[in-house]
Image (cartoon, grey):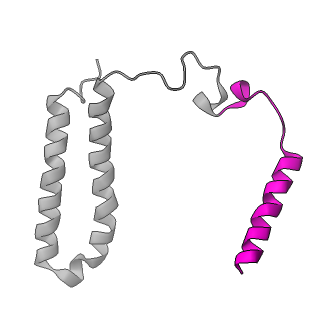
């Protein structure tokens, strides 16, 4: 099975090498969805974007854990509800920190 998988991967790689379109990588890259870049791809970001990232991660991680929790909360009962409120309290500290740092001010 391992040999078959390796042969399949090698065959797909060879097919790619034979059929790939050769173009200038600077003009066909996925940076900015194909638009001409105005700055370098690894340019520096302003420090305010780190607070915005923290805010996004707080909401993203919240949803990541709330979906499986909703499935088992009826079986586990009160301890699951308490644990979720503790978790949401910890995430709220991150949101309050981002708010204090000005991540919610867009002007």
Residue 59 highlighted magenta (yes or no): no
Image quarter where the N terminus lies is bottom right
Instruction: From the top left corner, tell me how far across and down residue 78 is, in percent.
Output: 11, 77
Quick one: 81 or 54, which is closer to the camera?
54
Instruction: From the top left corner, tell me how far across and down residue 33 is, in percent.
Output: 62, 32
Up the image or down, 1 lies above or below 32; here it is below
Count numbered badges in the picture. Answer: 0
Q: What is the chief secondary structure element of the magenta stretch?
A: helix
Q: Which residues are magenta?
A: 1-29
Taking the spot 18% from the left edge, 28% from the top edge, the residue there is: 101
104 vs 42, left or right, is left
Residue occupying the far right of the picture: 18
Up the image or down, 22 lies above or below 4; here it is above
107 vs 16, left or right, is left
Taking the spot 30% from the left edge, 54% from the top edge, the residue there is: 61
Quarter of the image for residue 34 reads top right
91 vs 3, left or right, is left
Taking the spot 60% from the left edge, 20% from the top edge, the residue there is: 37
Taking the spot 72% from the left edge, 25% from the top edge, the residue there is: 27
Image quarter where the C terminus lies is top left
Residue occupying the far bottom of the picture: 75
Instruction: From the top left corner, tell me how far across and down residue 51 is, in percent.
Output: 26, 32
Instruction: From the top left corner, tell me how far across and down residue 56 is, in percent.
Output: 32, 42
Residue occupying the far front of the picture: 3
């Amino acid at each position: 099975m391992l040999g078959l998988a390796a042969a399949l991967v090698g065959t797909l790689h060879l097919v790619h090498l034979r059929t790939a379109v050769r173009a200038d990588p600077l003009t066909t890259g996925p940076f900015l969805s194909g638009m001409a870049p105005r700055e370098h791809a690894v340019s520096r970001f302003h420090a305010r974007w780190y607070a915005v990232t923290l805010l996004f991660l707080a909401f993203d991680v919240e949803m990541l854990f709330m979906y499986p929790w909703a499935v088992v909360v009826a079986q586990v009962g009160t301890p699951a509800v308490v644990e979720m409120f503790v978790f949401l309290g910890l995430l709220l500290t991150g949101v309050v920190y981002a708010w204090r740092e000005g991540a919610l001010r867009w002007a």
